Amino acid sequence: MDFAMHYTEEQEKFRQEVLAWIKKNVPEKMKSPTDQDDRTPEYFAFWRERHKELGAKGWLHPTFPKQYGGGGLSAEHESILQEEFIKNRIPGQFTNGLIHAAVLVWGTEEQKQKFLKPMLTGHISAWQKYSEPQSGTDLANCETTAVRDGDEWILNGSNQFVTGVQRPNMLYGPAKTDPDAPRHRNLGFFLIPFPHPGVEIADQKMVNNGAQHFIYLRDARVPADHLLGGETQGWQVVNTVLEAEHGGRGQAFPREDAIDAMVTWLQEHKKAGRALGDDPVVLQEALEAYCEAHALELMNKRTYAFHMGGIEMTWEGSNTGLYTRDSVLRNVGRIRHVYGPYALLGSHDSSVPHGGVQDARQRSDFIRMHGAGSRNIAKVIVARRIGISRTRERAAATARV
Ligand SMILES: Cc1cc2nc3c(=O)[nH]c(=O)nc-3n(C[C@H](O)[C@H](O)[C@H](O)COP(=O)(O)OP(=O)(O)OC[C@H]3O[C@@H](n4cnc5c(N)ncnc54)[C@H](O)[C@@H]3O)c2cc1C
């Protein structure tokens, strides 16, 4: 099988258009810093405006339909955009984009115009509020409540670990609409505006980059048209979002900057006049990291090709998500062995290699085990889909965008 993308003359012209936009609009100092902790208020303000410009061109979400603010472009165009944006350190929109396909699948025409269009064009950023203090892994054990009152819903509950930078325009997640109904049939799914009376956000500092938050809903009233899907269809909507979060979309242009940096480090550095790779332990560790990173890259490309090609998937996406968590954790350990203490120097240290990429990854990759539901549950999902578990499960409804 040939995994390489092949581009037409028209698509290569598109690449030149993308590169020309970057050159004209993005000064070097506004490119994404190696350590995301180094992003400044000016950086966020600059990119919020550029994201709107990219949204207007359909380049923020290129494969989504044009009538809802997407680009109506092909997978190849998206691959070109991702490649050039990653190489040129152009940051993606500051939103949790996992909601977009769910609005396309579950939203009414009015909701797509009202919510999806401003999301896809960079005017609304949204955060995912799923995890509650007692229900992270066991998401169906949601205790947030939603009570109908005329044309509104009144929401009460709390969340933790909710990721996002600055402040969002919207929060999304499930709430119990029918406390007497059985599990999985008792939830609705809500889009909650922010700022909004009764909605509070507080920072939750973690070692990665301080981008997690607590959310508190206290008699927060949201209009009835902020319910996505039916009153008790929330679990299905939750799962459309999770299908993407667990890896079901793959990646058009996966990139492993920490591994690229490690290869450069080995090529350029010597110890006592000898190549670092002369040490057999360093060589073994580096090679294992390199191979595993490339296996992950291929899995991501395969999933992307399946998803965009409309090929039915069962375990492949979730398996990619599971392998990602395990392999990035193994690899940051190997990278520590290759670099020694240099792997732990921060971006502001005078002798830090590669602008601090390894230190940033040491901090972020070990907690990736816990995001998107625990790793144990990810295994259960894959087992159910390949048919070796107590129960069987199909992939959730999703959209080919
Ligand atoms: C960096 C980061 C970003 C995050 N971003 C978000 C976000 O944007 N939005 C959001 O809503 N949440 C977010 N989360 C929360 C994340 O989804 C939860 O941490 C995750 O679901 C696990 O829940 P928990 O922390 O409550 O652990 P628990 O559910 O308490 O699990 C603790 C341990 O028990 C094990 N366990 C629990 N139940 C079972 C079971 N039935 N079978 C086997 N083992 C089990 C788990 O595997 C785990 O090892 C984020 C977390 C992190 C670390």
Image (tube, rainbow, N blue to C red):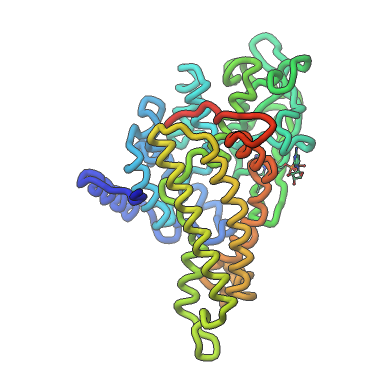
Vertical position of residue 165 compared to residue 88: above or below: above
Q: Residue at x 47, y 53 (%)?
A: 297
Foreground pick, 152 / 306 = 306
Residue 105 lies, in percent from the top left, at 49, 23
Residue 227 lies, in percent from the top left, at 60, 19
Foreground pick, 53 / 366 = 366
Residue found at the very far top of the displayed protein: 150
Vertical position of residue 272 compared to residue 105: above or below: below
Which quadrant is the C terminus positioned in?
Answer: top left
User: Is residue 339 in sight in this rendering?
Assistant: yes
Q: Quadrant of residue 27?
A: bottom left
Residue 123 lies, in percent from the top left, at 48, 34
Foreground pick, 202 / 332 = 332
Q: Residue at x 72, y 47 (%)?
A: 204
Q: Residue at x 62, y 29 (%)?
A: 392
Q: With 199 as the anchor, is 21 left or right in this view?
A: left
Residue found at the very far bottom of the displayed protein: 273
View quadrant of ligand 1: top right
Residue found at the very far left of the displayed protein: 9
Q: Quadrant of residue 26?
A: bottom left
User: Is residue 162 in sight in this rendering?
Assistant: no
Residue 242 lies, in percent from the top left, at 59, 34
Q: Residue at x 50, y 64 (%)?
A: 290
Q: With 58 as the anchor, is 237 left or right in this view?
A: right
Q: With 41 as the anchor, is 308 left or right in this view?
A: left
Vertical position of residue 6 compared to residue 150: above or below: below
Q: With 141 as the anchor, is 249 left or right in this view?
A: left
Foreground pick, 385 / 290 = 385
